[in-house]
Image (tube, helix red, strand yellow):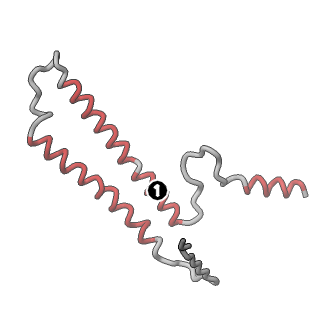
């Protein structure tokens, strides 16, 4: 009896949320696995943005030091860099949105015919 209880407790504790846990629990459905994969794919973009913005900030600080460069360089002030700074942030949401359509539309499909459907209705309390 105690061995059975030990096995049950060991199996039950394999996939529980832990305090200060980074990341999600293991996915129970393919839809949740797709959501987790999308999260990991999309997390790349804020890191990329952080690196590029930090590089531009340090480069601007280096180029505009009053003792080192009295005349600013063309790459920092110019039409080309302004076009890049305008187009690049508008392309990033497209790279984020397109892969997220797959899990979004897969959540709409009901694969299993449920035996019981529960409808929960909530009413706002007026004061």
**Picture coordinates of residue 85, whole percent (x, y):** 19, 45
Position of 43 relative to 124 (above/below): above
Q: Which residue in the rendered view is the most extreme toward the top?
A: 67
**Picture coordinates of residue 98, whole percent (x, y):** 33, 62
Mark 1: secondary structure: helix
Residue visible at 56% across and 66% down in the picture: 29
- Quarter of the rendering occupied by the N terminus: bottom right
Q: How many marks?
A: 1
Q: Which residue in the rendered view is the most extreme toward the right?
A: 1
**Viewed as shown, does residue 88 lie left or right of 23?**
left
**Picture coordinates of residue 61, whole percent (x, y):** 23, 26
- Quarter of the rendering occupied by the C terminus: bottom right
Position of 35 relative to 83 (above/below): below
Between residue 114 and residue 58, name the one nearer to us: 58
Residue visible at 9% across and 38% down in the picture: 78
**Viewed as shown, does residue 47 lie left or right of 78?**
right
**Picture coordinates of residue 38, whole percent (x, y):** 43, 57
Would you call the spot at circle 1 few (<14 residues within 10 Å), some (14-19), or many (20 or more)?
Answer: some
Residue visible at 65% across and 48% down in the picture: 18
Between residue 118 and residue 39, name the one nearer to us: 118
Residue identifier under label 1: 37
**Viewed as shown, does residue 39 lie left or right of 68?**
right
Could you say which quadrant of the image residue 58 lies in?
top left
Between residue 70 and residue 91, name the one nearer to us: 70
Q: Which residue in the rendered view is the most extreme toward the front?
A: 127
Residue visible at 14% across and 43% down in the picture: 82
């Amino acid at each position: 009896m105690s061995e059975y209880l030990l096995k049950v407790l060991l199996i039950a504790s394999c996939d529980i949320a832990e305090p200060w846990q980074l990341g999600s629990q293991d996915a129970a459905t393919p839809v949740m696995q797709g959501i987790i994969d999308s999260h990991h794919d999309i997390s790349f973009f804020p890191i990329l943005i952080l690196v590029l913005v930090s590089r531009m900030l340090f480069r601007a600080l280096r180029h505009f030091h009053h003792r080192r460069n009295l005349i600013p360089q063309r790459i920092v002030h110019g039409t080309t860099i302004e076009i890049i700074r305008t187009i690049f942030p508008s392309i990033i949401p497209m790279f984020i949105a397109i892969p997220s359509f797959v899990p979004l539309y897969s959540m709409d499909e009901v694969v299993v015919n449920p035996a019981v459907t529960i409808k929960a209705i909530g009413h706002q309390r007026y004061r």
